[in-house]
Amino acid sequence: MSTSSDISSLFKLFGGHSAQYREFSDEKARRAPERRWPGLTWGERADSTSTPSSVAPCSAAVGQDATVSSCSVDWAAESLSSMLAKLARGERVDRESVQAQRQRPQLAHLKVVAVISAKGGVGKSTVAANLCVAMQRQGKAVLAVELDPQNALCHHLGIEVAPGRDALSGGIALGQDGEAALLDGWQTTPLGVCILPYGSVDEARRRAFERQLEDEPDWLARRLSEMQLAEGSVVVLDTPPGPSVYLQQALAVANLALVVSLPDAASYTTLPKIDSLISTYAGNRPEFLGAAYVINQVERSRRLSQDITQIMQSILGDRVIGLIHRDPSIAEALAYTRSVLDCDPGSQGCHDLQACSQAVLAKLAATERHEQPA
């Protein structure tokens, strides 16, 4: 029997169609990220005029076996008879335990930074956007992923998500309907950074998406794996403040949690809470480096700002990787949907953000050293 006959018989056995079958050579697998993500390849500046490559719904999954299609069914390791027996006894089939038995998606080729905060109003999205630009200017391939329904990161990077244009705006919240919707949702911003917006969705769809994230703790990990990003790409996740299902998803894949805080009493009192969330959702993964802290809007002229900054530095030590001083240039750049790196490259804020981006990249480089064989 020929190879094609074997394949056809196999697909018929599982109720599929042999037309879905694709073979990928090592060279095709290696080149796939360059075709799919023209703005996310090392050594290239992202072109704001570029458009995403067309992506077939049945694209190759990134992992050790490049021949496995991402359209293959992800069967649970628990046997069907065992789950049926539970139902017969009136027991609930625990979806999370089923998920835990599946093979974890391979993300070793990526460096993931979750930008988080315990409370709103600390300038988290501003910091995330400027760090993306700074790392991209340093030659890194950067993908910003908006996990906040407010789509604030899009505004900071010069992308408008218009309401009522779900099918056109694309975004991560629309990826629940299929892989292709997620893969085609990314955009190249005027600042040269690629971004995957949250998307413009109504309340019913947002709640449905959040329920899906609760049911599938590894949803984001699987989607990032399926996107076939180039080796060494940096993924920056912007999350809503405080505890949320988005924070849980982000910390489940992050190599580094970057906590943005203000030097004020309200922010200081929330730090134990965010530390607890980090420990709960990310503390047990060997690839997780821990938390790093950025103190934002430090004011030299105010004694309280200086005192709380000093206290935080004394408690957190070298986990504080950067101070960003209050600088009108940062707010002015945002008003014109530009980066402070372009608007005022000689400003204190620009200098601080560049120093923070270098510190983040240095932290991420530690994962590369950790992964090197002894």
Image: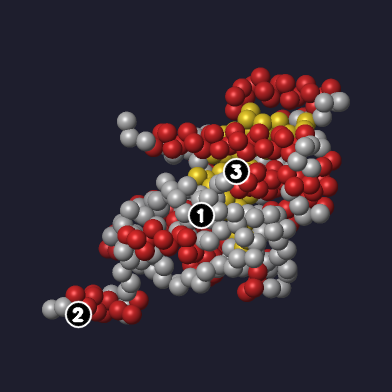
Residue at 64 percent of width and 55 percent of height? 192
10 Å neighbourhood of mark 3: few (<14), some, or many (≥20)?
Answer: some
Q: Secondary structure at mark 3?
A: loop
Q: Position of residue 314 (x, y in %)?
A: 66, 19
Disc ID at residue 5: 2
Instruction: Describe residue 360's horizontal placement relative to residue 344 as left or right.
Output: left
Residue at image x 51%, y 54%? 41
Residue carrying label 3:
138
Q: Amino acid at mark 3?
A: Gln
* C-alpha separation, residue under disc 3 versus residue under disc 2: 51 Å
Residue 66 horizontal side relative to residue 239, left or right: left
Q: Secondary structure at mark 2?
A: helix
Give the residue type at disc 2.
Ser
Label 2 vs 1, first from the N-terminus: 2
The residue that appears at 41% across and 67% down in the rendered structure is: 59
Total numbered labels: 3
